[in-house]
Image (cartoon, rainbow, N blue to C red):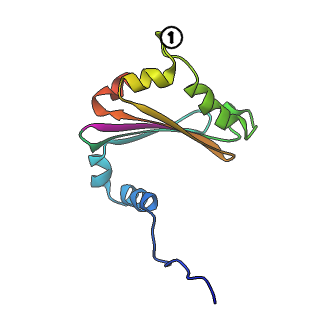
Amino acid sequence: MTAPSRPRHLVTLPLFLALLLGFVPSVRAALQWDEEGLPSGGTVMVAGGISPTLATLRMIVPAGTADSADDPLLAPLACRAFLGTTAPDGTPLAAYLAQRGWTAESFCELEGAELALSGPADGLDAMM
């Protein structure tokens, strides 16, 4: 007896959204999507308009860039170090973000790291 296989036509939601954003300019414009490359090879992506109240800021740092000094373990540590910093008023960053209705998550793998901030759209400029 063999295990049932997954349907080959099954497309995950993130892949579907990536394809939709890439091939349908009007959808990409409606989401107010912006992307900027970093000198080290990383990427900063900002998405607004997902809902009237939600915005997302993502920073992706690939391993082996100038930011990670060619050490694949340093890119994930950079995002963790960022989350461990303090706001200008001395408040721990996680608490500072929470006070303003924002959350921060880091996704760390050997290939690189991603930092995601999500919160109210009207506070996006302040978070930047």
Figure quadrant of the N terminus = bottom right
Figure quadrant of the C terminus = top left
Residue furthest to the right:
71
Q: What residue appears at the point 44 percent right and 20 percent down from the top-left corner?
A: 96
Relative to 97, say whether 64 is above or below: below
Q: Position of residue 17 (x, y in %)?
A: 39, 57
Q: Position of residue 88 (x, y in %)?
A: 48, 12
Relative to 80, say whether 87 is above or below: above
The answer to whether residue 122 is seen in the rendering is yes
Residue 54 in magenta stretch: yes
Callout 1 amino acid: Gly
Provide the major secondary structure of the magenta segment: strand
Q: Which residues are magenta?
A: 53-60
Residue furthest to the bottom:
1
Q: Position of residue 6 (x, y in %)?
A: 52, 77
Asked whether 111 or 98 is in front, the reply is 98
The answer to whether residue 128 is seen in the rendering is no
Q: How many marks?
A: 1
